[in-house]
Amino acid sequence: MTQPTDPMPDTPPPTPFWVFGYGSLIWDPGFPVAERVLADLTGFHRSFCMWSIHYRGTRDAPGLVLALDAAEDGSCCGVAFRVAPEHAETTLAELRARELISSAYVERWFDVALRDGRRVLAVTYVVDPDHDQYCGGLDLEEQARIIAKATGMRGPNRDYLSNTAAHLRDLGLRDEELDWLETRVAALNKSAG
């Protein structure tokens, strides 16, 4: 498993400053991007293993969002974003406000392999398996039923799923579980409506 390096929260981001995105950051980074490179992180896999009680669901009807879940032989393909030095501190503050809305995600810094051969230190957000929003182990059918119905302050859960799956495909990064979920959620919504 990739060992994290965690700078102190009050220290400035390293230079160069990289962010590893595996879900909505891929299609909605929300910060100025100086460089975008396909990347891989080992020791984790992308999974709908976190209840969403804000962005894609509510406390009464939670949705699901993707998180990096630790897996000894896991690997996650995503995108590494380099942030220009003049935007680094603001970007890190904005990422923390977005990703750490609850304490279900934990900020970690990992050695990430860029697909162009470089290795960089990048910040990313992994799920805390001890948090009450952690829901690892849900089978795909149950995930599909939840995603088909849930809506939060950033819109329907199914839009989050379809945007992520589509952008991964556009980048040539297939995720068979997300593709299956997208097809199943569409079928559930069609039959419901």
Image (cartoon, rainbow, N blue to C red):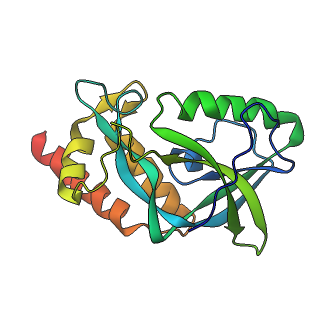
- Residue 110 in percent (x, y) is at 67, 57
Q: From what the image shows, is residue 116 above or below residue 36? A: below
In the displayed structure image, the side of residue 147 where residue 98 appears, left or right: right
Which one is nearer the viewer's eye here, 171 or 138? 138
Write down the quadrant of residue 59 in the picture.
Answer: top left
Write down the quadrant of residue 176 in the picture.
Answer: bottom left
Which one is nearer the viewer's eye here, 101 or 164? 101
Number of marks in the rendered image = 0
User: Residue at horizontal 35%, vertical 27%?
Assistant: 152
Write down the quadrant of residue 139 in the picture.
Answer: bottom left
User: Residue at horizontal 31%, vertical 25%?
Assistant: 58
Where does the N terminus fall, quadrant-wise? bottom right
Q: From what the image shows, is residue 75 above or below residue 50? A: below
Where does the C terminus fall, quadrant-wise? top left
Q: From what the image shows, is residue 127 above or below residue 115? A: above
In the displayed structure image, the side of residue 128 where residue 147 appears, left or right: left
- Residue 117 in percent (x, y) is at 76, 75
- Residue 121 in percent (x, y) is at 75, 57
- Residue 17 in percent (x, y) is at 80, 48
User: Residue at horizontal 64%, vertical 56%?
Assistant: 4
Q: From what the image shows, is residue 55 above or below residue 118? A: above
Which one is nearer the viewer's eye here, 145 or 133? 133
In the displayed structure image, the side of residue 172 where residue 69 appears, left or right: left
